[in-house]
Image (cartoon, rainbow, N blue to C red):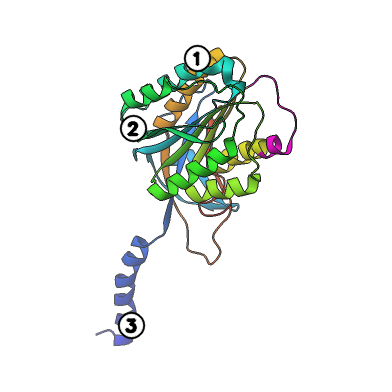
Amino acid sequence: MKPWFVVLPLVAACLVSPSAAAQTPTRDVYVGVVDGKGAPVTDLTAADLSVREDGVAREVLKVAPATEPMQIAVLVDDSQAATDEIQMMRDGLTRFVDALRGKAEIALITFGERPTLLVDYTTDPAKLKQGIGRVFARSGAGAYFLEAVVEASRGFEKREAKRPVMVALMTEGLEFSTLYYQRVLEALEKSRAALHVLTMTGVTAASTDEVRNRNILVAEGTERTGGRRDQILAPSGIPDRMQQLADELIHQYVVTYARPETLIPPEKIDVTVKRPGVTTRARTRTAGRS
């Protein structure tokens, strides 16, 4: 018979090991992957992706299509600067709504003069299209984009949105918000929303403090949250870009990876795909870190 002091460690190991394995902490991150033509890549597996946090490799446990319904705040520039683009903006918004039918709750928010809720969150395409038909450029109005981002972010928090997405369709006209970009980034990060910005190029506004804050917010906000940042050269290109964005959102992945518990949470996350010729969009700051 084996001594009791040999048997007990073996029993303890059998009891502890399965439990410890089951309690391995994991994290999820949403990832969009498109090819060189902007079409979604739909056949990725765990072996195709790598995840690093603060430069440390993490084990990718699972890659699956993202099926959690989205909550999408669509911010629409209806300032005077958007006058020539309004019809194409409506066409693009209509295609976006049609593509996401049944896959997202969508709200329409305009930000000429001040942020205005045009249509509250709904899955009803008829209500959304009625709202799209009420999008007109406001004569003499300037854009308050930064304020719209803050208000939409707070709305996501109140709704406790599970998969929040913010889409901005805007011009390069003057910005009238007086908010500092860092404050807006903090609100965006707190909401955990991914920010996608489609900008129609035209006459570039003067380099005021307000415009600089907007430009920094667009650059850093899209990069940090895993969003798309597009420059649209002609209004006729708006519908196709909105369709592309909808397709990318519909075909996102949710990537589950292992993350050991640490006293100080990691700050940066880097998700890459081991295939040439593809573009990967994912959050670059871990949730809760601004």
By secondary structure, the bulk of the magenta-drawn segment is best described as loop
Evaluate if marks 3 and 2 touch, with contact meaning CB atoms under 8 Å apart.
no
Q: Which residue is mark 2?
A: 103
Q: Which residue is mark 1?
A: 87
User: Is residue 45 among the parts visible in the rendering?
Assistant: no
Q: Please tell me whether mark 2 or mark 1 is closer to you in this view.
A: 1
Residue 210, magenta (yes or no): yes
Q: Which residues are magenta?
A: 201-213
Residues at marks 3 and 2, CA–CA distance in whole angstroms: 58 Å
Image height check: is 287 above or below 238? below
Residue 285: x %, y % from top left: 56, 49
Find numbered disc 2 in the image and state the secondary structure of the residue it sits on.
Answer: loop
Residue 175, magenta (yes or no): no
Q: What amino acid type should be assigned to the residue bearing mark 2?
A: Lys
Q: Residue at x 33, y 32 (%)?
A: 103
Q: Residue at x 36, y 62 (%)?
A: 21
